[in-house]
């Protein structure tokens, strides 16, 4: 679970970096395309320098030709691009706080559904009352933490972008699970991440080309190197979640990552606050509630796994 929390920390840091790059350039989609491109280049270099990764990347065409998994699982990379697109459209209408609430709500619902049906060949996991409670408390914790920034928002007038954000959150569970299946087929998480980044990069470049006729006005590119490090953190996020899902399942991995996102956002607001950011008691208490919910869901999953192991163990006479 600590790996999943670490992935959430990376994701919150990546969001801050990509947000800063988007603000500097004046265009969020261009910033996201750069981020995906940097991550893709890093993975290509890793494949060139690491024989095991290079060998697993060489397995990609064969895995696709053999049909080791449905080819539409490659849409996991498209989901990453869709997250970026939803950020570029919905955040301008509902704000970051409400977007995060809707995204996390979708993640919890989608992850529970995927765990229940056993998506990608994983054994189905019964969604116990404790796990349902953990998901509900996670949503409540995120709403509580985001409430100071979301106060005063006219939710009824912004229902459509909120629904779209929740749908993207549901798809993020599919993205994580699909990447896990691809990692098993290729042999390494790095190969799955490379395919994921390549697919998402192609989609984002296509979006850029579609926008060219209308013109894309950009500010000068920032000189500091850290503006361009978001893709590297995204590469680590994908790799960590692929490994975590094998042990924890989609739901607990997603919940732990949410807890990591809140911790990371809280630390960033305290140690390196952005313009207009603030830390309130509600933010702190919401973060604590979310972490407790993650622990509850993880405990429920562990108890279920342990019970299943005992049932399969033959009695000794």
Image (cartoon, rainbow, N blue to C red):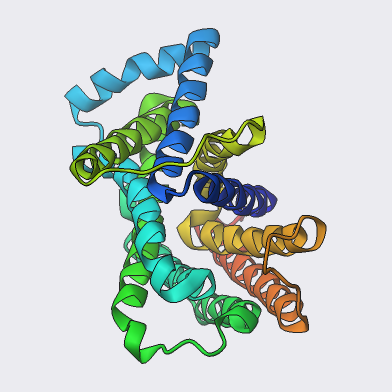
Residue 43 position in % (x across, y down): 48, 23
Vertical placement of 118 versus 286: above or below?
Answer: above
Residue 215 position in % (x across, y down): 26, 43
For the question of whether residue 123 can be seen, the reply is no
Write the residue at 32% across / 54% down: 119
For the question of whether residue 273 can be seen, the reply is yes
Left or right: 168 as drawn, with respect to 64:
right
Vertical placement of 181 versus 119: above or below?
Answer: above
Vertical placement of 228 versus 166: above or below?
Answer: above
Vertical placement of 54 versus 188: above or below?
Answer: above
Write the residue at 60% across / 83% down: 147
Which of 132 and 279 lies nearest the eye of the viewer? 279
Residue 219 position in % (x across, y down): 48, 41
Residue 5 position in % (x across, y down): 66, 54
Tell me which corner region of the image, top left, top right, bottom left or bottom right, holds residue 94.
bottom left
Write the residue at 69% across / 68% down: 277
């Amino acid at each position: 679970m600590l790996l999943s929390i670490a992935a959430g920390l990376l994701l919150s840091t990546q969001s801050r970096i990509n947000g800063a790059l988007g603000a500097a350039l004046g265009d969020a989609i261009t910033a996201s395309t750069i981020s995906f491109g940097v991550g893709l280049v890093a993975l290509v270099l890793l494949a060139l320098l690491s024989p095991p990764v290079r060998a697993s990347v060489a397995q990609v065409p064969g895995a696709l030709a053999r049909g080791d998994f449905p080819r539409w699982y490659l849409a996991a990379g498209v989901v990453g691009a869709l997250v970026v697109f939803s950020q570029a459209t919905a955040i301008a209408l509902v704000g970051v706080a409400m977007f995060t609430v809707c995204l996390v709500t979708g993640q919890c619902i989608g992850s529970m559904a995927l765990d229940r049906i056993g998506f990608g060949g994983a054994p189905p996991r019964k969604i116990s009352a404790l796990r349902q409670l953990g998901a509900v408390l996670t949503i409540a914790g995120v709403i509580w933490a985001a409430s100071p920034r979301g106060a005063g928002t006219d939710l009824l007038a912004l229902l459509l972008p909120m629904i779209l954000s929740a749908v993207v959150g549901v798809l993020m569970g599919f993205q994580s699970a699909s990447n896990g299946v691809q990692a098993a087929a290729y042999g390494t998480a790095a190969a799955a991440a490379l395919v994921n980044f390549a697919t998402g990069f192609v989609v984002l470049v296509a979006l850029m080309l579609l926008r060219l006729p209308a013109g894309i006005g950009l500010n000068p590119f920032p000189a500091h190197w850290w503006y361009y490090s978001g893709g590297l953190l995204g590469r680590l996020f994908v790799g960590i979640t692929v490994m975590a899902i094998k042990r924890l399942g989609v739901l607990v991995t997603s919940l732990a990552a949410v807890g990591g996102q809140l911790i990371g956002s809280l630390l960033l607001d305290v140690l390196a606050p952005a313009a207009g950011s603030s830390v309130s008691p509600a933010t702190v208490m919401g973060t604590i509630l979310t972490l407790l919910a993650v622990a509850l869901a993880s405990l429920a999953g562990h108890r279920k796994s342990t019970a299943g192991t005992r049932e399969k163990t033959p009695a000794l006479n």
